[in-house]
Image (cartoon, helix red, strand yellow):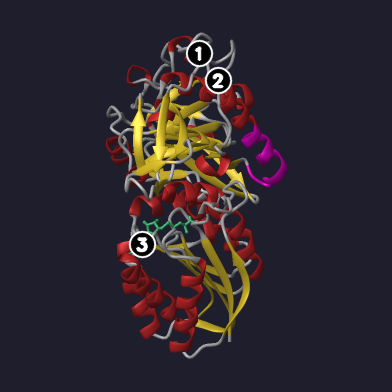
Amino acid sequence: MGEARSETKGRVTISRRGAERLRAGHVWVYRSEVAEARDVQPGALVTVQEEAPFRPKQLSGKSVRLTGPRVLGSALYSTASEIAVRMISSKPVSDLEQLVRERIRAAIAYRGRFVENTNAYRVIFSEADFLPGLIVDRYNDLLSMQIVTQAMDADAMRNVVVSELLEAFNPAAIVERVDPRVRRLEQLAEKESGVIYERTLLAGETPVAPESGGGSTSAGAGRGRPAPHNPLKDGVGTAAHVNTERQVTTEFQMNGVRFVYEAPGGQKTGAFLDQRENYTAAAQYARGEALDVFCYQGGFALHLAHKCSRVTGVDSSRPALEIAEQNALLNAREIEWIEANAFDLLRDYADAGRQYDGVVLDPPAFAKSRQNLQTALRGYKELNLRAPKMLRPGGTLVTCSCSYHVSAADLLETVTAAGVDSHRNLRLLENRGAAKDHPSVLGIPETAYLKCLILLVR
Ligand code: SAH
């Protein structure tokens, strides 16, 4: 490191349409809005300028540029993604590594101010922390990192990120979660999820087996430890250094509820950390019998369990429910887990006249793109039509959408219509978003993807 200082060589000229989005507070420029890209390497730091307007020159009939291009700032460039440009500063950046270090420290300091009652939270959230392409989650003493752009995948960037994380958290391990589809789209070398850093045990320390609990991390306990590798010296996360075999597990807690975390073998990440504050909000109103639909590893169900006499969780994924049951045991709660298609189950239960005091609906993102928005809205409508019918008067409905394409207004409108069709009156107790470790940036609507409405049913 050190000598590999970044310099801005490339220059990207963008259309007025792209420039207008940037002026409105966004940071992305799409490939179709790039008029010219000069000297650009994959993942390069580039200077972004706006195409100078052409004005007709009346006498000759030719168009001429009347003004020079306007410089809009510095960005990270992708030669492959549809999102060609991700702005990182409105000023020229001479030392990208230093800027990234400062932003990581700021992201960590932000969590220090605003995140409480948990040792699991999102430490860095890409554009929402002015670090496009980088996501880091903390699960107690483990960190999980995800890289989704060419720029962040560069070895120099990885070294900066890992060294800052080690300094701030001294984690037991860092795992990298890889989305193969994203790497293909960014034309990055294939790679598997795995452990990219493991702390060397100090003399006398022994690795703790997962069974022993107590919140300690176990990394492949009992299988002998590999020679520790020094990320700063050896480089981090290059294909040669990923250990895909090792299973790392830990235990984390949020709002006093305990959870197991398995990486990277788990079905997805360890948890939906963005719902953390919504769990507490939902629990506030909980009583009697509750049904958590799309429960995954039991996030809502476990939070409701200390207020309710009976909690049922429903999900179509058996592996998720197996972890949910482990979580229930860890918290000494008895929860009924049902493996089923939520749509079928809700129809059957509604037909059978089953009644609850609380229902949670937290489906996966139905609208993956704008094209299937209408189909997605029909899905939300169906769920939100059935649930109120299954609620006793005075019961609460917690209904969520994590589709960015479904706006807060779309969801409200759909739930309103569903309430009318189900002949129930719905009063809005809370209109919520993601927890504060997933901040949404005004001007970047993609950062405001999660909606959570809490309604009182009459
Ligand atoms: N509420 C959870 C997160 C839910 S994520 C939490 O707070 O942790 C969405 C879940 O929906 C996933 O676990 C997925 O397995 C499940 N799922 C997707 N389609 C489903 C279906 N048709 N029926 C039941 N579960 C489904």
Q: Nearer the viewer, residue 49 or 128?
A: 49
Q: Which tag, 1 or 3, sits closer to the chain's start?
A: 1
Amino acid at dot 2 = Ser
Where in the image, quadrant-wise, is ligand 1 located? bottom left
Which is the main secondary structure of the residues drawn in magenta?
helix
User: In the image, which disc is placed on residue 232?
Assistant: 1
Q: Amino acid at mark 3?
A: Ala
Check if mark 2's residue and mark 1's residue have beta carbons within 8 Å: yes
Local secondary structure at mark 3: loop
Residue at 46% x, 71% y: name it: 410
Name the residue furthest right.
113
Name the residue nearer the viewer: 382 or 142.
382
Cβ(mark 3) to ligand 1 < 8 Å? no
Question: Alpha carbon of mark 2 to alpha carbon of mark 1: how far?
Answer: 7 Å
Give coordinates of residue 87: x percent, y percent: 49, 38
Q: Secondary structure at mark 1?
A: helix
Highlighted magenta segment, given as a residue range: 106-118
